[in-house]
Amino acid sequence: MSWELATAGTVAVLLGGRSAEREISLQTGATIVAALSSLGCTVREVDPAVDGWVAQLEGVSFAFNALHGPGGEDGVIQGALETLRVPYSGSGVLGSALAMDKQRSKQLWQGVGVATGGFVTLAADTDWEAVIARFGKVFVKPACEGSSVGMAPAATPVALAAAYRKAAAFGNTVLAEQFINGPEYTVAVLGNETLPSIRMETDREFYDYEAKYLADDTRYHCPSDLNAADEAEASTLALAAFRSLGCSVWGRVDLMRDADGRFYVLEVNTIPGMTSHSLVPMAARAVGMSIAALVRRIVELSWEGRQHHG
């Protein structure tokens, strides 16, 4: 019934936007438009970077949010949609804002006991030598960007200072995270369940923007190489990280596994990509779920969730 109610009128797909991830959002949006159209929906594409976009939401029964990065994934558009009383997909204002802010995500996980790597917040006057002495190699990243935008590894004070300047171009808050030497996994969350984990393998130094969206030599293992007990552990950790931030409906949790086999949460993505290279559709395919079926389930879960809190 929730599907019928949500799609009773025109479904808006929010795509594009003004963030550094605009191009990826346009691709994600195109995938979702195609899926909704194949399910018989009347679809309207709405780009918040275009003047007058709010008027385009007049009369829509549901908004599928395909915006990535600041302005789309950080609670801002969610708050606007709440104010306009337009039901929308995915996490609400709080979960979106917290997950987008890597600094506060990690602070919260440390507080509630969700395993995450050590980190320090950088500033222009940071003692670069002290950070390297404490952690050895680190990954530097802007606190509020996605898609590995502005990320770089650093193993010397000089490299750390350069990486900080690069990341600072994308926002005021920059983190240096402890380098965890091991494979990277991602676990998709759908409702109260997880989809099979995926292990990412790249010949690059790390799983960067190129490896994510442009390279054809990035290898994805789905199902991954985890045994049943380790898969369950990764799933439990992913759900704990997701729920502790107040996220809901769907998302993707990135994990690292160290040499001792321990998992650590890197970050939560509340609006994962849905492009040809994207990981959530890949995990869904592993359990026999098409992109159209996945999109339909996201709409259903979102509608049901919105009804519980107004």
Image (tube, rainbow, N blue to C red):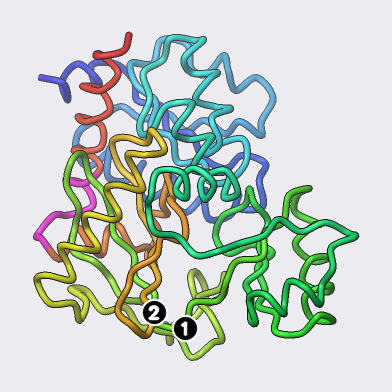
Q: Is residue 42 above or below residue 148?
A: above
**72 relative position to 7: left or right:** right
- The image shows residue 19 at horizontal and vertical percentages of 66, 46
- The residue that label 1 is drawn on is 181
User: Does label 2 or label 1 sit earlier along the sequence?
Assistant: 1
Q: Are marks 2 and 1 in contact (CB under 8 Å)?
A: yes
**33 relative position to 165: left or right:** left
Residue drawn at x 26%, y 79% as measured from the top left:
221
Q: Amino acid at mark 1?
A: Asn
Q: Quadrant of residue 118?
A: bottom right
Residue drawn at x 48%, y 34% as measured from the top left:
14
Residue segment shown in magenta: 287-294
Q: Nearer the viewer, residue 295 or 205?
A: 205
Q: Is residue 263 above or below residue 290?
A: below
Q: Nearer the viewer, residue 227 or 63?
A: 227
Q: Amino acid at mark 2?
A: Asp
Q: Is residue 88 above or below residue 224?
A: above
Total number of numbered labels? 2
**308 relative position to 112: left or right:** left
- Quarter of the image that includes the C terminus: top left
- The image shows residue 210 at horizontal and vertical percentages of 56, 75
Residue drawn at x 43%, y 45% as measured from the top left:
271
- The residue that label 2 is drawn on is 258
- The image shows residue 250 at horizontal and vertical percentages of 30, 42
Q: Is residue 23 magenta?
A: no
